[in-house]
Amino acid sequence: MGCDGGTIPKRDELVRTKQKQQRLDRSVELAAKWQYCAISSTRLHEPIVSCPLGRLYNKQAVIEYLLDKSSAPNSAVCEHIRSMKDIRQLGLTSKTGYSDKKSEVDGQYVDTQDSEFVCPVVGIEMNGNYKFCYIATCGCVMSDRALKEVKSDNCHKCNKEFSADNDIIVINGTDEEVEQLRKRMIDLRDKEKSMKKSRKRKATAIAAAEAAAVADETVIENGDKPETITTKVSASIVFVQSSTSGTTTTTRPQPSAAAAASTSSATTSTSSKLVDKSSKLYSVANDPKASETYKSLFTSHETARKQPKAHWVTFNPCYY
């Protein structure tokens, strides 16, 4: 009944107040980040890997995600992982005497913050109460306190050299730290793309130069003049330079007095290379010191082309 004169109602019974937002228990939140995989939500077990943003995963879960991205329950967490090159297997230090089989008996206290791994330098537990990092070059995990107290350019665990500005990644950091790691990851990927493009351009230029050299050798063996060879070499060099700069210009250089002088010097150097047997442009057919009898031993000589062909039943390497 109520409100009949015999009861006094309270304010919360008459006025509807705004409900307070339910807060997640901190121990549950830390356990979800530090003891369970971010993709499959299963308990972490070795081998454990991490991404450039500092999240923890089971290696098997990452492989299954890369094979079938639609099967992952938390695929939005790991969209930045493109391949196995984007993750690093962690070198963790196990805690001596750790046992994960703990049950509450008769109201006995169970430590939910007990961790399987500890810092190899300081010895504090890796449970989320302390800041932990891993080194991208080697994958060794240690606390931020150890990196600050023992300052060194080499890893405290494996003695591998690293950069304090670019190789240290915070594990399960704050939103600000995750945003900084994301910007670093994007900058690093852009740099890798530009380096890959420059390597591809250099490889294209080298291949074009080698093709031009092979074509020049063919021209020399056929008996063309040195001036023609020099003109073709210069034209191929102009084409390679234009292709590396990003344009498709194939304009040949205009003749001038300086160009004529350079052409004559190039012709002299080319003719000297023809005599030099160690040069790639050397050919027996154009060697003035070689006799005609010696030149006739090679298949590029005119007399070799006039030889009769062998019968199809027999095989003789002297015929072709």
Image: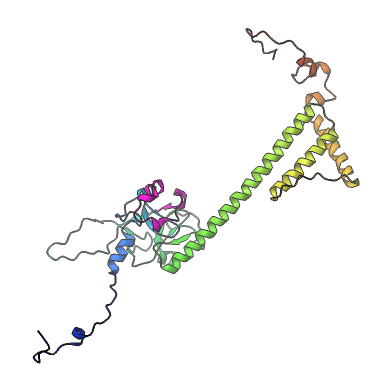
- From the viewer's side, name the closer residue of 39 and 159: 39
Considering every residue shown, the one lying at the far bottom of the view is 5
Q: Quadrant of the C terminus?
A: top right
Q: Quadrant of the N terminus?
A: bottom left
Report the coloring of the rendering.
rainbow
Residue 230 image-quadrant placement: top right
- Residue 186 location (% of width, % of height): 52, 59
- Residue 238 location (% of width, % of height): 76, 45
Residue 163 lies within the magenta run: no
Q: How many marks?
A: 0
Left or right for 295, reference 120: right
- From the viewer's side, name the closer residue of 206 and 282: 206
The residue segment tinted magenta is: 63-90
- Residue 283 location (% of width, % of height): 78, 27
Residue 270 image-quadrant placement: top right
- From the viewer's side, name the closer residue of 204 and 139: 204
Q: Residue at x 79, y 15 (%)?
A: 303
Q: Residue at x 45, y 61 (%)?
A: 169
Residue 89 lies within the magenta run: yes
| Residue 270 in view of the camera | yes
Residue 56 image-quadrant placement: bottom left
